[in-house]
Image (cartoon, helix red, strand yellow):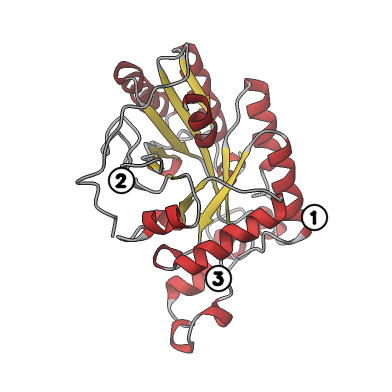
Amino acid sequence: MEPSTEHADPTRTTVPDGYEFALCLTHDVDRPYKTYQAPYAALSGDPLYHLSSLRPSVEPYWQFEEIMRLESELGVRSAFYFLNEPSLFESQPLREWVRPANLLEHAGRYDPTDAEIASIIRRLDEGGWEVGLHGSFHSATDRDRLAEEKGTLESILEREINGGRQHHLKLSDETWEYHRDIGLRYDSSLGSSSSVGFSHGYDLLRPFGDEFVVFPLTAMEVALPDPSEDMDVARSVCANLVDEAASAGAVMTVLWHPRYFNEREFPGYRDLYRWVIEYTLDSGGWVGAPNELLDATD
């Protein structure tokens, strides 16, 4: 259930000077390693490729360097939201262990404090990318859990983080209040994984009438036409969204999961992401991470 936006103040956001509209780039780091997905995918074809990813030296979903390289070439930065899913067997009662949804969330979980993950978190931060919170599966109704997950990321960075998005876009009536209470500046969970567009308006929302803001999600990559089937159609949908943002002076927010930059499994999505950024820049739009936008418009 989403928190009500009936009384949210849709305050017109001033985009940075010299720009007509803004595009915010975000990435939810759900599963940086391909694990349980490999045997399942092997059943549908190309088993040698999919099963090879079970080797420790092969990490097809580890796409951080590729994203950093692409965005650096374009002169932009994005936000990476890191997940800290607690152990199912340590955090949930026995009856919850057999629920398929819980088992799926537990499979492939990672610990952000592990050396490899913590290292890329620091590298992103040092390179100018935003690091944020990807609230775990049950955290939308658990203030203490959200605070713990935020604290873990901050201990890695040795400084505060400012925003994030809930896993699976899960929101409750209390989630934004909890986000504000634990010191987050913004949330970007309000949106859909099955449709694209400005269904929640063109501007940031201020649900409490104060400095805490909500970035509505305009498009998740999985909700767009598959570029491997017809790149022209996918580009046309994205161009229409950017054109609408430009005409409305809007803040547009997109989500590309890092695994979609793996061209072998998700052909076309990396190129579509680059095209959206280039099209936005050519259209006079500002491009960057949500917290960067807030800093630029304070």
Tell me which numbered mark, 2 or 1, is placed earlier along the sequence: 1
Nearer mark to the viewer, of 2 and 1: 2
Q: Residue at x 51, y 40 (%)?
A: 256
Nearer mark to the viewer, of 3 and 1: 3
Q: Position of residue 30 (x, y in %)?
A: 55, 55
Name which residue type carries label 3. His
Q: How many marks can you see?
A: 3
Q: Residue at x 42, y 59 (%)?
A: 178
Q: Which mark is residue 181?
A: none
Q: Is residue 285 left or right of residue 240?
A: right
Q: Is residue 281 left or right of residue 123?
A: left
**The N terminus, quarter of image:** bottom left
The reply to whether residue 34 is visible in this rendering is no
Q: Position of residue 153 (x, y in %)?
A: 64, 55
The reply to whether residue 94 is visible in this rendering is yes
Residue 243, by quadrant, is top left
Name which residue type carries label 1. Ser
Query: For the residue labelled by badge 1, is the local secondary structure a helix, a strand or a loop?
Result: loop
Q: In the displayed structure, would residue 269 be above or below residue 159?
A: above
Where is mark 2, residue-wise?
Answer: 207
Where is mark 3, residue-wise?
Answer: 106
Query: For the residue labelled by badge 2, is the local secondary structure a helix, a strand or a loop?
Result: loop
The CA span between labels 2 and 1 is 46 Å
